[in-house]
Amino acid sequence: MREFRVLWSSVILSTAGDRLALVALTLLVFDRTRSPLLAAAVYAVGYVPWVIGGLFLAELADRYPRRTVMVICDASRAVLVAVMVLPHVPIGVLVALLFAATMFAPPFDSAKASITPDILAGERYVLGTAVLQTTLLAGEVLGAVGGGVAVAFIGVRSSLAIDAVTFVLSGLLVRLGLHARPAAARPESVGPSPLARMRDGFRLIFGDRELSTLLLFGWLIALYTVPAGIAAPYAARLGGGPIATGAIIACTALGTMLALPVFTRFVRPRQRINVMGPLATLTCGSLILIGLRPNLAISLVILLLSAAFGVYQVAANTAFVMRVPPQRRAQAFGIANMGVIVGQGAAYVAAGAVAEVVTPAAVIAVAGGLGAVVAFVLTLRWRHVSPPGGRHAAGRRPGYAGASGPIPLRESR
């Protein structure tokens, strides 16, 4: 499928480049200030704009042609990142430009996820989703490792220049390689008020106990990726530098990337939903081991293991999208992604603040323990609202036409 190959290439280009820039800016701030709180805050700036974008901009991918939305978002981000490359730009301006560029991520990623089932149908969609998720994680790993290496050898602004080029290439691929398709929602079905549309989107999700439970499973990622938010101070505590920081961030995605193909190929769909809760509990609970203060090598193994258990997100994603109407895809993705990104941003800032007074290892262990408790509660709730063999165990909710796209395991914008 030529269109799918184009989409795949676009995802890995933009994801790797954007992660590289985020790591570069985080390292720059920590190097100048030596403050875990400020470093975590800069890392969080790459996520916070999802509050606005996820609520008010993601639905643009329903109201306008999705290919057009993706191209405009890529072009805008390329320009904003290019400005960061200019010499003598203060750190505050760099952070503001990163914030503005991230605003274009929700409509882009909602359009990307929503257009995938238009390109792939049936079982190809399931396999294609796994490939895209693996690709996104690979992009995060390459970008994180590349960010540490790039800062060490070519500097921050050269790393940002690479990021700008990736957005240009991604936009060209989407424009030239994807077919033009009409908007999914009719103008009269959109409604006049953005606030009203936002309210309806929340009502759609949180008015359904199954949808809300699945969404909360997805939002657990904010707790088990806390090591990424305080990677720089944690690496410094272990005697590491930029490359160690990049490796810690990379491991929070690498484990999932390696486990995802195995999980989707060898575990049957019904088994995936049955093990979703236990895996969610393990992905958080395994981080408690960091509280034993292992060395860098063992820490990376623990982070890899935790991330590997994170494949439960595939089951949560699939179950979620089978319950969302196609004409509401992008809005549902926007709300879901907004929660993930905002949760991560808040968790990173909180973790950085606490790491000012206690060790980063203790912060990671506490976050993991809290996440394990929440995951256990959600597991009990899911078994209550959707027991094995129930009406949704094997397919979609009656009246919903087809599957949609996934809640991203983690957006890297």
Image (cartoon, rainbow, N blue to C red):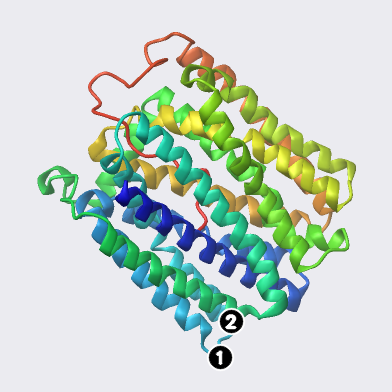
Identify the residue under disc 2: 157
Q: Which disc number belongs to residue 383?
A: none
Amino acid under disc 1 = Pro
Q: Residue sitting at 53 percent across and 22 percent down? A: 272
Identify the residue under disc 1: 87
Residue 408 visible somewhere in the drawing: no
Q: Residue sitting at 66 percent across and 28 percent down? A: 281
Q: Is residue 151 above or below residue 42?
A: below
* Position in image of residue 162 (x %, y %): 52, 75
Q: Residue sitting at 47 percent across and 42 percent down? A: 131
The mark tally for this picture is: 2
Kindly give the residue lying farthest to the left in the view shown: 188
Place residue 129 in its image quadrant. Answer: top left
Kindly give the residue lying farthest to the top in the view shown: 389
94 and 404: which one is in front? 404
Q: Is residue 373 above or below residue 223?
A: above
Specify which label sits upstream in the sequence, 2 or 1.
1
Kindly give the residue lying farthest to the bottom in the view shown: 88
> 340 left or right of 227?
left
Q: Is residue 13 above or below residue 30?
A: above
> 229 left or right of 213?
right
Place residue 368 in its image quadrant. Answer: top right
Q: Are marks 2 and 1 in contact (CB under 8 Å)?
A: yes
Query: Which structural element holds mark 1?
Result: loop
Place residue 24 in its image quadrant. Answer: bottom right
